Image (spheres, rainbow, N blue to C red):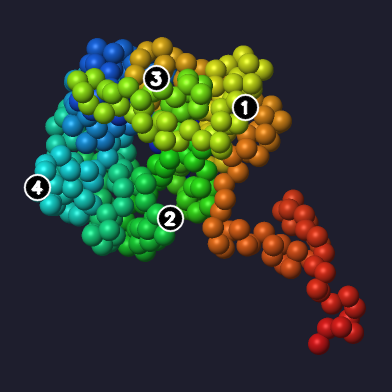
């Protein structure tokens, strides 16, 4: 499948590529990103192959990620119009200012102003609430987002890293008031992070939100580069004495993750792919997923990730990966499967079978 095979995002007509270029690595300010020249080469590679969806945030590399995109895309009107640029608000760039971050009206307008300036554009295609703000009423956030959509400065809105109940509250409020609805949900999703299958993914599918997973490689852990026996090299510090992501990777290496890494390597050999490509292909195949966010620190990494669209896993691969990574769900999700026989009484409904309920009356005489 080519990168220029597009899908509509959620319950909207917005066409996006099936992979989204994540730009958190654009700029060296956080210690583990890439330089400006490499960032621009990755944008060009992604664009030339048909990719049209870029994801950034106002806080990424202290605002430099947006500026790189602005200098390379925003300053080119012809190219800018072809791209779907998504950025985020909520994070603060100003220490000591309580109003510089969050999802309240003052913060949203100020953050939008500076994002438009750095991106060198008159509008943002998709504006994400980066994470849930516990201090701001959701109606204030949604009304403000509707205002900026009506102003033409934003085309669509979505939520990232927000509890399901909060998303439902926001979407229902938008429907009741005739405000601009959410069209997408950005969440962490990978073979090693499947708890989102409990509430967030069913919620998104029910409300018409296109899912854009971030960290499909669990920060690089699923790339095949790491194992518990060879964890040492990833603990090195970042550039300029800044922290690296190595400690984060080693923290997630465990008895549970090692069989998954082994399976990825085995399956990658069987389908002539890399472990990274298999892990991304698994995420992109999941129900409800529209466009998976892939990041990279080099053109070679990005090229490898894009090839994930050409990977075709076998049913036995999916079955084994599901078995190895099946999440432990909380109540009531761990209880509800037990009720199937009580409701369905041994019948099959929507292709879901059930066993007879042993405590049900066996004859009409047993029913009161």
Picture quadrant where residue 163 is located = bottom left
- Kindly identify which residue carries mark 2: 164
Frontmost of labels 4 and 2 is 4
- Kindly identify which residue carries mark 4: 96
Give me the C-alpha separation between circle 1 and circle 2: 32 Å
Judge the density around disc 1: few (<14), some (14-19), many (≥20) Cα neighbours within 10 Å.
some
Name of the residue lying farthest toward the left: 96
Judge the density around disc 3: few (<14), some (14-19), many (≥20) Cα neighbours within 10 Å.
few
- The disc placed on residue 263 is 1
Estimate the x, y position of residue 268 in percent, counting from the top left: 60, 19
Estimate the x, y position of residue 255 in percent, counting from the top left: 56, 36
Badge 1 or badge 2: first in the primary sequence: 2
Give me the C-alpha separation between circle 1 and circle 4: 47 Å
Q: Secondary structure at mark 1?
A: helix
Q: Residue at x 23, y 16 (%)?
A: 36
**Looking at this view, is 91 or 364 the one in front?**
91
Q: Residue at x 58, y 58 (%)?
A: 333
């Amino acid at each position: 499948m080519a990168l220029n095979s597009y899908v509509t995002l959620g319950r909207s007509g917005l066409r996006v590529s099936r992979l989204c270029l994540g730009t958190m690595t654009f700029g060296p300010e956080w210690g583990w990103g890439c330089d400006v020249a490499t960032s621009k080469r990755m944008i060009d590679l992604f664009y030339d192959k048909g990719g049209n969806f870029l994801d950034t945030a106002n806080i990424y590399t202290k605002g430099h990620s947006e500026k790189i995109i602005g200098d390379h895309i925003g300053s080119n009107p012809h190219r800018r119009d072809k791209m779907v640029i998504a950025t985020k608000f909520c994070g603060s760039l100003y220490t000591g200012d309580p109003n510089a971050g969050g999802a309240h009206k003052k913060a949203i307008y100020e953050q939008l102003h500076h994002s438009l300036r750095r991106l060198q554009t008159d509008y943002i295609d998709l504006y994400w609430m980066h994470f849930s703000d516990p201090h701001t009423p959701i109606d204030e956030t949604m009304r403000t987002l509707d205002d900026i959509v009506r102003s033409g400065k934003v085309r669509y809105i979505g939520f990232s890293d927000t509890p399901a109940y909060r998303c439902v509250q926001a979407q229902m409020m938008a429907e009741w008031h005739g405000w601009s609805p959410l069209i997408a949900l950005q969440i962490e999703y990978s073979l090693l992070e499947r708890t989102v299958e409990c509430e967030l993914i069913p919620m998104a599918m029910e409300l018409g939100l296109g899912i854009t997973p971030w960290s499909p490689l669990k920060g690089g852990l699923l790339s095949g580069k790491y194992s518990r026996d060879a964890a040492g090299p990833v603990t090195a510090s970042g550039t300029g004495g800044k922290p690296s992501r190595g400690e984060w990777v080693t923290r997630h290496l465990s008895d549970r993750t090692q069989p998954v890494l082994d399976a990825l390597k085995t399956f990658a050999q069987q389908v002539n792919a890399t472990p990274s490509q298999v892990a991304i292909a698994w995420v992109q195949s999941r129900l409800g997923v529209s466009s998976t966010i892939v990041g990279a620190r080099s053109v070679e990494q990005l090229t490898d990730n894009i090839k994930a669209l050409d990977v075709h896993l076998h049913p036995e691969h999916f079955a084994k990966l599901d078995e190895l990574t099946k999440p432990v769900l909380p109540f009531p999700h761990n209880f509800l499967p037990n009720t199937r026989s009580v409701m369905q009484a041994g019948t099959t409904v929507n292709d879901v079978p059930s066993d007879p309920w042993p405590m049900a009356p066996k004859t009409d005489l047993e029913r009161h």
